[in-house]
């Protein structure tokens, strides 16, 4: 018997909430501009006078960014097999990012894991755990740049720095948890199991299932305990996010906006964490608001800031989405297959909760 999904799991609800968040963010980003009677003319002028010679450079940096991402994933998956970065790993990565641009609730991550697991015959928990592990190293690199930016940035209210430090501290705690999970899997799983079993409304069967998934996901990742491999993954993560920061500087330079690299580091961190907020597919409005919140502290030309945010956004959104869709069409898979697999996973978890009520 199929269990009824909670309303917040329905795609229509997730999409509605996401669109509402994006509309609100876009309005907040545009509000400082629209207060000016000449705002539209200034915006048009910014796009008309921009230097679009940076576009080929942006595409080259994008390719290197995703190539490095595939190489890093190869290192993470080395214990379970030797995969070719461009042929085996780049297509699922591009497909995942493409569907993140098209589907709500970051479902592109599940699509990426599903495609990779089907193509390479890898267990889904291992695929998912490797993607989660990627996020851990991404957060490490982002926090590094955000921390450097906050330390050396000038002209910012001290209260803003204090709030950012609190947020960075919370994120660092999550990173530490991820590292402990990888290196000391068994103690970590035992601690998670003990904490979850203290929460009476969570079924013990669901707790056991989650712990099994954590243990299965960590299998094959044991070599990440080795220093040289960890060092290589961290270095690639730092370089990869430096490239993303260079994309910000290129977009700003195109619209004649000059800021110091430390400002770009702060903006990089704000955008990276901002896009984790539930929003419409493609993060429309969120990226624009992040640009405005950071750069209006240093740059008086608000229409140029907004225009640069659109350029930064769309110069990545369009090629990544198109390339990912081409890879997906060439894979021979269908949206129906992905939806069926996702529905089965959701129903399996729901069934565990329904058939095995919490024990005292």
Image: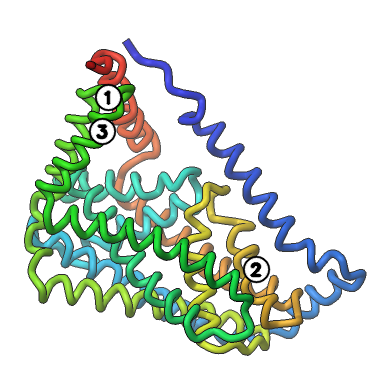
> In the shown orientation, is residue 49 left or right of residue 154?
right
Label 2 to label 3: alpha-carbon separation: 38 Å
Quadrant of the drawing holding the C terminus: top left
Pair 2/1: label in front: 2
User: Which circle, 1 or 3, is nearer the viewer?
Assistant: 3
Closer to the eye: label 2 or 3 = 3
Horizontal side of residue 309 vs 31, given as left or right: left
Circles 2 and 3, Cβ within 8 Å, touching? The answer is no
Q: Secondary structure at mark 2?
A: helix
Is residue 347 rendered to the left or right of residue 29?
left
**Mark carried by residue 196:** 3
Instruction: Name above or below for residue 76 compared with residue 243.
Output: above
Which residue in the protein does label 2 denote? 293
> What separation in Å lies between label 2 and label 1 (alpha carbons)?
42 Å
99 and 272: which is toward the camera = 272
Image-based side of 257 in relation to 268, left or right: right
């Amino acid at each position: 018997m199929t269990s009824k999904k909670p309303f917040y799991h329905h795609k229509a609800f997730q999409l509605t909430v996401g669109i509402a968040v994006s509309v609100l963010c876009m309005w907040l980003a545009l509000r400082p501009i629209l207060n000016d009677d000449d705002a539209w003319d200034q915006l048009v002028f910014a796009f008309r006078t921009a230097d679009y010679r940076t576009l080929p450079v942006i595409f080259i940096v994008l390719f290197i960014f995703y190539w490095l991402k595939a190489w890093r994933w190869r290192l993470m998956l080395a214990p379970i097999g030797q995969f070719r970065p461009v042929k085996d790993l780049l297509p699922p990565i591009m497909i995942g990012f493409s569907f993140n641009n098209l589907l709500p609730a970051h479902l592109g991550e599940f699509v990426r894991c599903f495609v990779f697991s089907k193509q390479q015959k890898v267990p889904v928990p291992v695929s998912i755990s490797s993607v989660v592990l990627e996020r851990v190293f991404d957060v490490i690199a982002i926090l590094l740049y955000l921390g450097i930016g906050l330390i050396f940035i000038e002209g910012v209210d001290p209260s803003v720095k204090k709030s950012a430090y609190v947020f960075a501290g919370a994120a660092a705690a999550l990173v530490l948890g991820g590292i402990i999970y990888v290196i000391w899997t068994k103690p970590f799983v035992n601690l998670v199991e003990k904490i979850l079993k203290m929460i009476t409304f969570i079924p013990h069967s669901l707790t056991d299932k989650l712990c099994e998934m954590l243990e299965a996901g960590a299998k094959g990742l044991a070599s990440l305990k080795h220093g040289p491999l960890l060092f290589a993954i961290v270095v690639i993560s730092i370089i990869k996010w430096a490239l993303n920061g260079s994309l910000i500087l290129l977009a700003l330079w195109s619209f004649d906006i000059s800021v110091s690299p430390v400002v770009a580091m702060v903006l990089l961190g704000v955008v990276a964490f901002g896009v984790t907020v539930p929003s419409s597919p493609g993060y429309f409005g969120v990226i624009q608001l992040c640009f405005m919140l950071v750069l209006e502290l240093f740059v008086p030309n608000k229409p140029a800031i907004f225009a640069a945010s659109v350029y930064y956004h769309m110069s990545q959104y369009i090629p990544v989405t198109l390339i990912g869709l081409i890879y997906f069409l060439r894979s021979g898979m269908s949206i129906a297959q992905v939806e069926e697999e996702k529905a089965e996973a959701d129903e399996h978890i729901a069934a565990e909760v329904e058939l095995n009520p919490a024990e005292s």
